[in-house]
Amino acid sequence: MSKTALIVIAEGTEEIEAITPADVLSRAGVDVTVAAVGSVELRGGHGIPLRAEMLVEDCGTILFDALIIPGGGRGAEVLSKSQWVTDAIRRHFEAGKIVAGICASPAVVLAPTGILTGKHATCFPGLERRFPSDVTACDTTVVVDGNLVTSRGPGTAMEFSLRLAELLSGAQRAIEVGHRMIVPNM
């Protein structure tokens, strides 16, 4: 049975941080679902149309192998205000599932849930100030600490996605996907 991932988007989501994980994980054999807060048809942070398969509420309390929260300042703020998103983050984290955030979302969406407590994490430069004092802020492109995966921003979306592919589908599969996509240094 293939692994599953849920990518949650909202109005203002950073497009590359939503599309890249969906694409890479699909190539790695992961069953990817994209769900949205507010509306299934929305615009990303740069005005590019995005479309989700369903609203987050339609996912109910299903646990996926990975829950992925893209950034984008406006999108992260919208996601942080969703009780469903907050509950899903806590539910997935407590169940030992992968919870991943990139760009603004580690600081704006994940930190308020308490899951970063005592962890190493990264985020868009400058937003570390929003981390609780007991979070070790790292300036590396991708940080994995247990079942928590965080990354810095749009330019790290491919590395972030390939790391998720490795965690969900194995190193060999992630390397194969990277090679087929002509990712440097794979």
Image: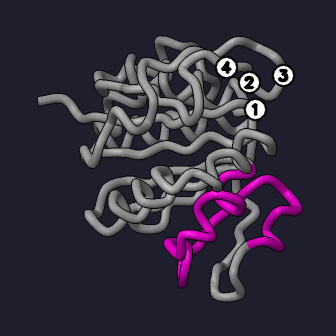
User: Secondary structure beneath disc 4?
Assistant: strand
For badge 1, the amino acid type reads Gly
Residue found at the far bottom of this picture? 134
Relative to 183, residue 10 above or below = below
The residue tagged 2 is 44
Q: In this view, does 69 lie to the left or right of 140?
A: left
Q: In which quarter of the image is residue 12?
A: top right
Q: In which quarter of the image is residue 174?
A: top left
Which span is picked out in magenta? 104-130
Q: In this view, does 57 lie to the left or right of 152?
A: left
Considering only order in the chain, which callout, 4 or 1, is on the residue closer to the N terminus? 1
Mark-to-mark CA distance, 3 and 1: 7 Å
Mark-to-mark CA distance, 2 and 1: 4 Å
The chosen color scheme is one colour
Q: Nearer the viewer, mark 3 or mark 1?
A: 1
The residue tagged 3 is 46
The answer to the question of whether label 2 and label 3 lie on touching residues, with beta carbons closer than 8 A, is yes
Considering only order in the chain, which callout, 1 or 2, is on the residue closer to the N terminus? 1
Which x, y percent locates residue 70? 62, 40
The answer to the question of whether label 3 and label 4 lie on touching residues, with beta carbons closer than 8 A, is no
Which x, y percent locates residue 105? 66, 52
User: Secondary structure beneath disc 1?
Assistant: loop
The disc at residue 12 is 1
The answer to the question of whether label 1 and label 4 lie on touching residues, with beta carbons closer than 8 A, is no
Q: Quadrant of residue 171?
A: top left
Binning the other alpha carbons within 10 Å of mark 2 as few (below 14), some (14 to 19) or many (20 upward) gives: many
The disc at residue 42 is 4
